[in-house]
Image: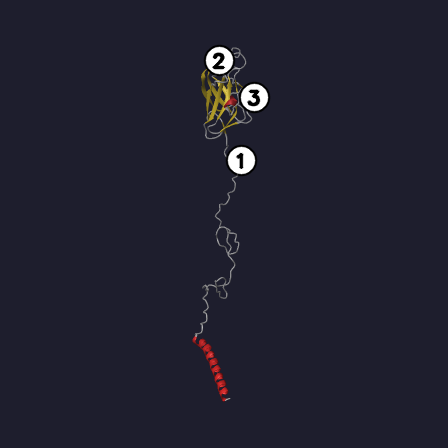
């Protein structure tokens, strides 16, 4: 009976010592480890370590969140306000249209002038076809566009009378000659009557005058040219209106 008590006491003491040893180990681990220092607050504007955020930050940046800036198409960063950009545009301002008239009269110079012997060069040739014809060509030698009104006014040698007009040759519009362009007129040297009946003769010189816009008289100085040799004409001679095409002038 004494032996059983002794063993029981020994066992209890051993268990108590083991428990005290375990408790001492746990407390000792906590006693040896130094306490972790408190985290210092991050300075304003400094980035926090990855994966952590500080109070009052958004996405690792300090300060209160702001409204995103407005970006316009020109690459300038705005402030979220539409100021209208008044007065800072560099685009050219449209100019007011020039007035076409001043005090009731046109301020622009006349775009066209009348063709005359002074701004054209006149030549006369004898075409191979049709026979008994001459071809008059007036070329604009001036710097401005000229208008060849009606038909050339012709005077053979010193004759006072001018050939009749071929009315069927009248064009639908006035012939307009830009610098360098030419107008043409055909001359029919004789008619249906025989030469002896129509008072035929050989002529050597031809004076060409130009008609004004209103068709009365002539304008400018005449252009005088020498005719091809043996040019024979009668009183039945006729002349066409000015034409823009050579073939149109010789079809009558």
Q: Are marks 1 and 2 in contact (CB under 8 Å)?
A: no
Q: Position of residue 44 (x, y in %)?
A: 46, 65
Please tell me which residue lies in front, 49 or 87: 49
Q: Secondary structure at mark 2?
A: strand
Question: Which residue carries the number 2 mark?
Answer: 201
Q: Secondary structure at mark 3?
A: helix
106 versus 216 height, above or below: below
Q: Position of residue 80 (x, y in %)?
A: 52, 56
Disc 3 to disc 2, C-alpha distance = 27 Å
Disc 1 to disc 3, C-alpha distance = 38 Å
Q: Which mark is residue 168?
A: 3
Dot 1, crowdedness within 10 Å: few (<14), some or many (≥20)? few
Seen at 43% across and 76% down, the residue is 32
Please tell me which residue lies in front, 203 or 6: 6
Please tell me which residue lies in front, 27 or 125: 27
Disc 1 to disc 2, C-alpha distance = 53 Å
Dot 3, crowdedness within 10 Å: few (<14), some or many (≥20)? few
Seen at 56% across and 21% down, the residue is 168
Q: Secondary structure at mark 1?
A: strand
Q: Earlier in the sequence, mark 1 or mark 3?
A: 1
- Of badges 3 and 2, the one in the foreground is 3
Question: Which residue carries the number 1 mark?
Answer: 105
Q: Earlier in the sequence, mark 1 or mark 2?
A: 1
65 versus 239 height, above or below: below
Q: Are marks 3 and 2 in contact (CB under 8 Å)?
A: no
Q: Earlier in the sequence, mark 3 or mark 2?
A: 3
Judged from this view, the residue extending furthest toward the bottom is: 2
Seen at 47% across and 80% down, the residue is 18
């Amino acid at each position: 009976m004494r032996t059983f008590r002794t063993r029981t006491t020994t066992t209890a003491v051993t268990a108590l010592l083991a428990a005290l040893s375990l408790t001492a180990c746990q407390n000792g681990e906590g006693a040896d480890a130094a306490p972790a220092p408190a985290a210092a607050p991050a300075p304003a504007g400094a980035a926090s370590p990855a994966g952590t955020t500080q109070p009052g930050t958004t996405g690792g940046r300090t300060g209160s969140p702001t409204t995103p800036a407005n970006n316009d198409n020109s690459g300038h960063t705005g402030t979220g306000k539409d100021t209208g950009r008044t007065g800072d545009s560099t685009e050219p301002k449209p100019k007011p249209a020039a007035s076409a008239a001043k005090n009731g009269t046109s301020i622009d110079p006349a775009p066209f002038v009348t063709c005359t012997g002074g701004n054209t060069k006149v030549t006369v040739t004898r075409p191979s076809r049709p026979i008994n014809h001459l071809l008059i060509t007036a070329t604009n030698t001036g710097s401005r566009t000229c208008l060849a009104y009606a038909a050339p006014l012709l005077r053979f040698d010193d004759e006072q009378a001018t050939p009749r007009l071929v009315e069927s040759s009248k064009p639908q519009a006035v012939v307009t000659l830009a610098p360098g362009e030419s107008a043409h007129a055909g001359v029919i040297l004789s008619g249906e009557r025989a030469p002896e009946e129509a008072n035929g003769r050989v002529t050597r010189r031809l004076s060409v005058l130009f008609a004004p816009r209103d068709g009365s008289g002539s304008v400018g100085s005449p252009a005088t040219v020498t005719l091809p040799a043996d040019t024979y004409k009668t009183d039945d001679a006729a002349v066409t209106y000015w034409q823009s095409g050579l073939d149109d002038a010789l079809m009558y």
